[in-house]
Amino acid sequence: GQQVMQIPQYQHVQEGEDFTTYCNSSTTLSNIQWYKQRPGGHPVFLIQLVKSGEVKKQKRLTFQFGEAKKNSSLHITATQTTDVGTYFCAGVPEKTSYDKVIFGPGTSLSVIP
Amino acid sequence: DAGVIQSPRHEVTEMGQEVTLRCKPISGHDYLFWYRQTMMRGLELLIYFNNNVPIDDSGMPEDRFSAKMPNASFSTLKIQPSEPRDSAVYFCASSDGTAFGSDTQYFGPGTRLTVL
């Protein structure tokens, strides 16, 4: 079946270090979304990427959608303690009902002050 | 807008009891999703509705789980009878899927269910 995987599962970084999480799909995606879930909270939408090779930035966060539209990455520059949480990617497979979003297992980020 | 509203926020019950979780989606959203989140299995899609009609319930674990959406502003997820392995956080989410690129899902605060 269609799967969305993420690596790493966990990441511990020193405050100020960079962080990257990678998302890979078994099928081509029509778009990909990223969500952040703080400990004890609920997933919150961060951004959506639609075009092949698209790159979007939100302050210290850089999101990229692969040329083949099967992978994506989220890069955080100079992490802060407020970045702590689990980052999920969620893909919408091509040629399927576009409302069927498949979530990855998430990458849990810990930031050591 | 108040966002997606879920109740109760916490539920503790005993094995064998019936549990009903409630959700009010964002007004105007056509899609409603129920998820379950555990440490072991992550975020799992249980069922989703479009215009109050169940579209895909393949994620519902077994017949003990049922979901309804009697109108555009209310949905329930029922577990009967509940078992300890049902303990999890249950999220409801809604989205406005009326145009391509508008698939963003807005999650409610979740219901933390503990079955003893």
Image (tube, helix red, strand yellow):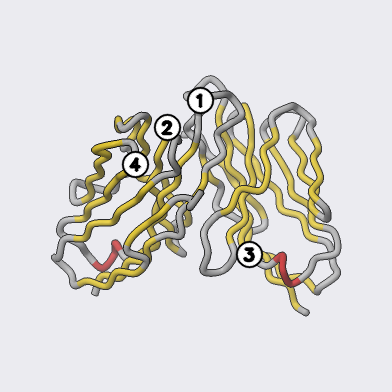
- Identify the mark nearer the N-term, 2 or 1: 2
- Whether label 4 touches label 3, CB < 8 Å: no
A30 sits to left or right of A14: left
- Measured in 3D between alpha carbons, the distance from the residue under mark 4 to the one under mark 1, in whole angstroms, is 17 Å
| Label 4 packing within 10 angstroms: few (<14), some (14-19), many (20+) | some
A4 sits to left or right of B86: right
How many numbered discs sit on the rendered protein? 4
Q: Which of marks 4 and 3 is in front?
A: 4
Residue named by callout 2:
B30
Question: Could you tell me which residue is drawn at 18 percent across and 69 percent down?
Answer: B15
Chain letter of disc 1? B
Residue B113 on image: x %, y %:
32, 66
Q: What element carries label 2?
A: loop
Q: Nearer the viewer, residue B98 or A69?
A: B98
Chain letter of disc 4? B
Say whether mark 3 and mark 2 are on the same chain. no
- Identify the mark nearer the N-term, 4 or 1: 4
Residue B42 on image: x %, y %:
48, 56
- Whether label 2 touches label 1, CB < 8 Å: yes
Residue named by callout 3:
A85
Q: Nearer the viewer, mark 2 or mark 3?
A: 2
Chain letter of disc 2? B
- Measured in 3D between alpha carbons, the distance from the residue under mark 3 to the one under mark 1, in whole angstroms, is 30 Å
Q: Nearer the viewer, residue A26 or A62?
A: A62
Question: Which residue occupies the extreme bottom position in the image?
Answer: A113
- Whether label 2 touches label 3, CB < 8 Å: no
Residue named by callout 1:
B98
